[in-house]
Structures are given as C-alpha cells and as structure tokens.
Amino acid sequence: MMAVMRTPAFLSAVLIAFVPLLGPPAQGRQARGASSSAPAIEAVLVAQAEAWNRGDLIAYMRGYWRSPDTVFIGADGETRGWQTLLERYRRVYPDRAAMGHLSFDHLRVLPLAAGVALSDGRFHWDRGGQRVSGIFTLVWRRFPQGWRIIHEHTTALAHARLN
C-alpha cells in the first residue's frame, strides 16, 4: 500500500491544481447571484405578506417548499413539513381577525450557491393593539416554480417596537 504524501509541497501542489476548478471568488458569485435572486426572493416575501393580510393561508404557504422536509423553528419549537406547518397556522390563526397585519423590512439576501440563498430581516405583526416584532432567517432554494423557503427560524423580540 502506498503512503499518502502529507508534505507542505504536496498540499501546495494539490491546491494549485484544484483551486482554479472551484470557479471565481465568492464575492464575484455573490454579486452576480444577488442581482437575480434578491428581487425574486423579495417578491415572494411581498406576496406572502399580502396573502397573510387578506387572510389567505394557502397563498401565504406558496412561499414555502411543499415538502415534508420543510422546517420552521419558532417560539413553540420546531415544525417539520409543509402540511404540518399549514395545520399549525390554521390552529393558531383560525380566521382573518386572528391573523392581524404582517409586514417585513430590513430584508437582506445573500446567495450561497447556484439556486440557494439565505435571507434575513425583521417582521412586524399587529393584531388589535397587540404588537410583536422580531427577526427571521430563511434558507431558500430555487425550484422550477421559483424560489421557496426550505428552512425558517423566526424569533420574536421581547423589547421590540414597531418603528
């Protein structure tokens, strides 16, 4: 059996041979990816807020990947699966009045790879004088139907105010 060479010279040769195959630096990829993914992802979030504010949970859920592998993490813990998440929303928000008004701001989109992006921002939810604000992080994947949320982590901030 031949021993693997682990010398600095060997490692340098491997890096010199394979690094060019990885493509342009990440900054270049992000700049090109951001120009195409950010507006499309922001449009999904705008459509979700509009759907929520008219009480249309099915339209709101179109922003999520329709899969048992979709993940939502919030104050109540982890919810797995598109259908399970829809059922949770229906239980917690049984009608339009319970849904209140939702808005997003301070949105940022960071392309991670071809067809994959990360976004974060703030949400504001108001229902009859009850106001909650918080932060969220979303992992997105581009499918033939468009960008969909595959993983969400949302946290309400105890001291947050609507600005």
Image (tube, rainbow, N blue to C red):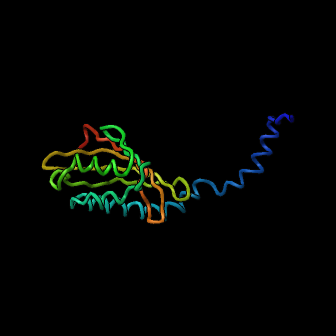
Q: Residue at x 38, y 55 (%)?
A: 64
Q: How many dots with numbers?
A: 0
Q: Position of residue 59 (x, y in %)?
A: 30, 62
On the image, which quarter does residue 20 sit in? bottom right
Which is nearer the eye, 104 or 58? 58
Q: Is residue 163 visible?
A: no
On the image, which quarter does residue 39 sit in? bottom left
Q: Residue at x 21, y 61 (%)?
A: 54
Residue occupying the far left of the picture: 128
Q: Is residue 95 visible?
A: yes
Which is nearer the eye, 121 or 151? 151
Q: Residue at x 37, y 54 (%)?
A: 107
Q: Residue at x 25, y 38 (%)?
A: 159
Q: Position of residue 2 (x, y in %)?
A: 86, 35
Residue occupying the far right of the picture: 2
Q: Position of residue 62 (x, y in %)?
A: 35, 60
